[in-house]
Image: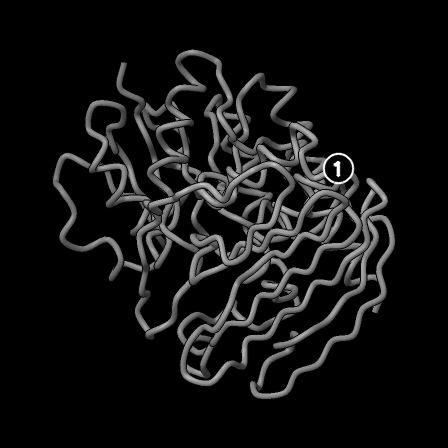
Amino acid sequence: MRIKVGIIGLGHIGNRHFDILNELPSQYKIVAVCDSNLKNLRNLDRKITIYQDYESLLYADIDLVHICTPHHLHAEMTIKALSKGNHVLVEKPMCLTSEEAKAMIAASIKYKRKLFVVKQNRFNEPVAAVQQLIEKGKLGKIYDVQCNVWWNRNEKYYLQSDWRGKLKTERGALFTQASHFIDLLVWWFGPVEKAKTMLATKAHNIQIEDCGHSIVQFKSGTIGSINWNNNLFEKNYEGSVTIIAEKGTVKIGGAYLNEIEYWNVKGIKQPKIKSQVKPNLYKGNYQGSGSNHAFVFKAVAKALINKSNNNLVEGIEAKAGIDSIVKIYQSV
């Protein structure tokens, strides 16, 4: 069975979806694409139906809609896609408010369609190794966690798209740069229940913050700090998670959470990992999270055919991440 896909949005991330889906011809067939910018619709295969209006695409003969548009459009487009009988895979962040997340989940239930959210870092080998430690209780009681997202986003990055850096359309850097990291923290320690946060805008002419620090407590009782900054000189420096626990200390990091930087766990040797995470470089010379989208897409195909999950993030779980980000911003 080949899953027939429609892609809404052919910007930076939409083009990545397009290219990777084409590399999985036994599982997927792209039958329709949509973008409001005609420049993004040039040089496409003539067998692919092209739309400038996303609602028209939803009536095409498709099984699954990939939503790769700016953040503020995710909720509306997802709900309409589900209402037309399509399954949905939406890029991070799922949406920008807890109310939107709740409405998206309600639509998924009402129309009996699947709602998946792209969280490709769950498929990184170091992340999987830490997940096994936590799931099996090998770390014992977890005391503290530190998450650092110290990246570079230059002025050109914010000028490339008119939705970036604006409160109404992006809301904050946690939704964009730190979204995948928040997902892992919530996966491992539960939603954020308490937070105390400071934000600042130091180097960019934007409405949102370009750096911030938050002290948090998760539902599990674990405390921690989340630190993010888009002002690193010239290039990304670090994206990392350090866990301090009763029976061990681990740190995963590298450019894409693709390296184990420290491992001292009682009775368990550090696993030898040869990372499969591919590097990425977007137009504008900035790097994002690792390109593990192929793993996500393969897992979605299995889920739709065999009803398995395989580390996929669905609506309810993704909402916990949105709720946590909202909680952090509310604590400023």
Between 274 and 181, which is closer to the camera in this rendering?
274
Please tell me which residue is depicted at 28% across the width and 36% down the height of the picture. Answer: 32
Place of residue 17 in the rendered image (x, y in percent of width and height, measured from the top left)? 33, 44
The mark tally for this picture is 1
Q: Which residue is mark 1?
A: 140
| Residue lying farthest to the front in this orientation | 267
Please tell me which residue is depicted at 77% across the width and 63% down the height of the picture. Answer: 329
Q: Amino acid at mark 1?
A: Gly
Q: Is residue 92 above or below residue 304?
A: below
Between 77 and 143, which is closer to the camera in this rendering?
143
- Location of residue 111 (image quadrant): top right
Can you say which quadrant of the picture contains the N terminus?
top left
Please tell me which residue is depicted at 48% across the width and 32% down the height of the picture. Answer: 88
For this view, does 97 lie left or right of residue 233?
A: right
Between 23 and 67, which is closer to the camera in this rendering?
23
Q: Is residue 126 above or below residue 105?
A: below
Label 1, residues with CA under 10 Å away: few <14, some 14-19, many ≥20: some
For this view, does 269 lie left or right of residue 100?
A: left
Place of residue 313 in the rendered image (x, y in percent of width and height, measured from the top left)? 56, 33
Q: Is residue 70 above or below residue 283?
A: above
SS under mark 1 = loop
Place of residue 298 in the rendered image (x, y in percent of width and height, measured from the top left)? 35, 29
Colour pattern:
one colour
- Location of residue 11 (image quadrant): bottom left
Please tell me which residue is depicted at 74% across the width and 47% down the height of the picture. Answer: 245
Q: Is residue 288 above or below residue 277?
A: below
For this view, does 59 lie left or right of residue 158?
A: left
Place of residue 174 in the rendered image (x, y in percent of width and height, measured from the top left)? 63, 61
Can you say which quadrant of the picture contains the C terminus?
bottom right
